[in-house]
């Protein structure tokens, strides 16, 4: 008989004492990570701070949320040092990276390094904007919502800028970019070996 923890209660498989979420019925974390690695996602560096104290972190959990009013959503780990600097009304920038910036994506995902050292950037719309990005989205934090081990940061968008370079994507735990296909065309993954 399998047992699991429900909130602070112990229960026996299929005999929980309440209607709360049963952690034992959720997917294995490794299987979940494998499934999520199959989703191609834009890679962005989220920034905040000032000209003398810039901060940023790499994310792939970023999406358009609303057209009226224009809003985006960024998901940040609760342990993120960047998250500790954000509050409602704070300026925030989302630098959607270009393929030329794949090393920046790795650098801004690392801990214990000066992420901005030697990086070309400027203050724009109240947040650090990286040179050479694919797309720039700037705004102010509208709301922050705790969700599992992350916080969803809802942003009211105040400015955008788009470049013609290729976007950096993250898929199957690797960086790449998008390639168009014709209607009806099938893309077959390349298997190395």
Image (tube, rainbow, N blue to C red):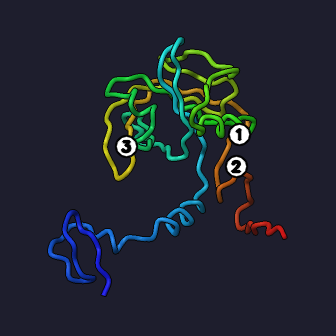
Instruction: Give coordinates of residue 34: x percent, y percent.
Output: 57, 65
Return the residue at label 3.
Answer: 151
> Disc 3 and disc 1: Cα gap in Å?
25 Å
Q: Residues within 10 Å of mark 2 (few under 14, many from 20)?
A: some
Badge 3, how many Cα within 10 Å: few under 14, some, many 20+? some
Between the C-alphas of marks 3 and 2, the distance is: 24 Å
Secondary-structure class at tag 3: strand
Other-residue count near label 1 (Cα within 10 Å), few / some / many at <14 / 14–19 / ≥20: some
The structure residue drawn at horizontal position 63% and vertical position 24%, both measured from the top left corner, is 130
Measuring from the top left, give residue 105's x and y in whole percent: 64, 38
Establish if 125 lies above or below 101. above
Label 2, label 1: how far apart the Cα atoms are: 7 Å
- Residue 4: x and y in percent read 29, 74
Secondary-structure class at tag 1: helix
Q: Which of pointers 3 and 2 lies earlier in the amino acid sequence?
A: 3
Seen at 19% across and 68% down, the residue is 9
Give the residue at the far top of this rendering. Answer: 52
Specify the farthest residue to the bottom: 1
Q: Is label 2 in a helix, a strand or a loop?
A: strand
What residue is pinned by disc 1? 102
**Residue 18's image quarter?**
bottom left
Q: Which residue is mark 2?
A: 175
Q: Nearer the viewer, residue 106 or 167?
A: 106
- Tell me, yes or no, whether the two marked residues, 2 and 1, touch with CB atoms within 8 Å: yes
Mark with earlier residue (3, 1): 1
Q: Are marks 3 and 2 in contact (CB under 8 Å)?
A: no
* Labels 2 and 1: the sequence-earlier one: 1
């Amino acid at each position: 008989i399998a047992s699991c923890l429900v909130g602070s209660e112990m229960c026996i498989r299929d005999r929980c004492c309440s209607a709360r979420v049963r952690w034992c019925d959720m997917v294995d974390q490794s299987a979940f990570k494998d499934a999520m690695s199959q989703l191609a996602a834009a890679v962005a560096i989220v920034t905040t701070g000032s000209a003398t104290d810039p901060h940023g972190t790499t994310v792939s959990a970023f999406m358009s949320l609303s057209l009226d009013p224009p809003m985006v959503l960024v998901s940040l780990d609760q342990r993120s040092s960047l998250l500790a600097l954000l509050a409602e009304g704070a300026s925030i920038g989302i630098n959607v990276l270009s393929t030329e910036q794949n090393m920046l994506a790795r650098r801004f995902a690392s801990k214990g390094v000066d992420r901005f050292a030697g990086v070309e950037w400027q203050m724009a719309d109240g947040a650090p904007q990286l040179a050479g990005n694919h797309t720039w989205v700037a705004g102010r934090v509208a709301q922050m919502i705790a969700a599992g081990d992350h916080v969803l940061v809802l942003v009211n968008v105040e400015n955008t800028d788009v470049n013609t370079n290729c976007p950096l994507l993250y898929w199957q735990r690797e960086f790449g970019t998008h390639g168009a296909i014709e209607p009806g065309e099938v893309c077959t993954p390349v298997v190395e070996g």
